[in-house]
Amino acid sequence: MTNKKNSYAGSVSRRSFLSGLGAAGVVATATPMVAAAPAAAHAGTLTDTAPETMEGAIPVTLRVNGKMLDLQVDPRTTLLDCLRETISLTGTKKGCDHGQCGACTVHINGRRINSCLTLAVMHEGDEITTIEGLGQPGNLHPMQASFVKHDGYQCGYCTSGQIMSAVALLKEKCGPSDTDVKELMSGNICRCGAYSNIVAAIQDVRQQA
């Protein structure tokens, strides 16, 4: 979506307004890392302190954003639900829950996957990175900063998945054109239609690399 200048003299443009608002939104995808620290610490000691044991739960140790967490999970729990419900890292979004929208994209050992399509217990020993582990307020990942710069979001729901896919794309074989980027980002849906801005944000980072 292209930005049009406001015709009213002295009024705030959509870009300046959304840049401020959007910066808060994109940073919010990293902010839960701070808020989740107590939750993550609690999750790391669930096996010792939890008064109730989930029927059928099994122990699993996950390395998430550099932290080792000892958990008790139902073996049927998806990685997405484990991240959101057990570890309280809610930056990874639940969209279609069928691997079609890309909102739940995370990195496993540096490669992007749809976390709704894999089980948490399958990733013991893997390096799991979520949007919270990508950048921090005041120290954004270049891709997060570029999404703010290029207004690569509207409602923001798909943004964390878009950014995680975009960061993974930087390490993948991708041609130089916008069409090439669109092809590799085709697994991430933006229902607001901010695709042109998303591509611009990605291309900006690629040119600086």
Image (spheres, rainbow, N blue to C red):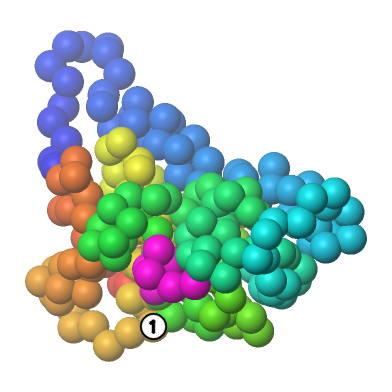
- At mark 1, the secondary structure is loop
Rendered residue at 22%/74% (across/down): 184
Q: Against 77, is 168 above or below?
A: below
Residue at 69%, 71% (x, y): give it. 58
Looking at the rendered structure, the kind of residue marked 1 is Lys
Residue 46 pos. (x, y %):
80, 58
Q: Residue furthest right?
A: 48
Task: Locate residue 200: give its quadrant.
Answer: bottom left
Reply yes or no: does residue 153 show up in magenta. no
Q: Where does the image place residue 120, in percent across and percent down from the top left?
A: 55, 71
Displayed quadrant of residue 161? bottom left
Q: Residue at the location (64% across, 54% down)?
A: 86
- Residue 77 relative to residue 155: left or right: right
> Which is more toward the observer, 15 or 164?
164
The residue under label 1 is: 171
The answer to whether any part of residue 96 appears in the image is yes
Corner quadrant of residue 186: bottom left
Residue range highlighted in magenta: 113-119
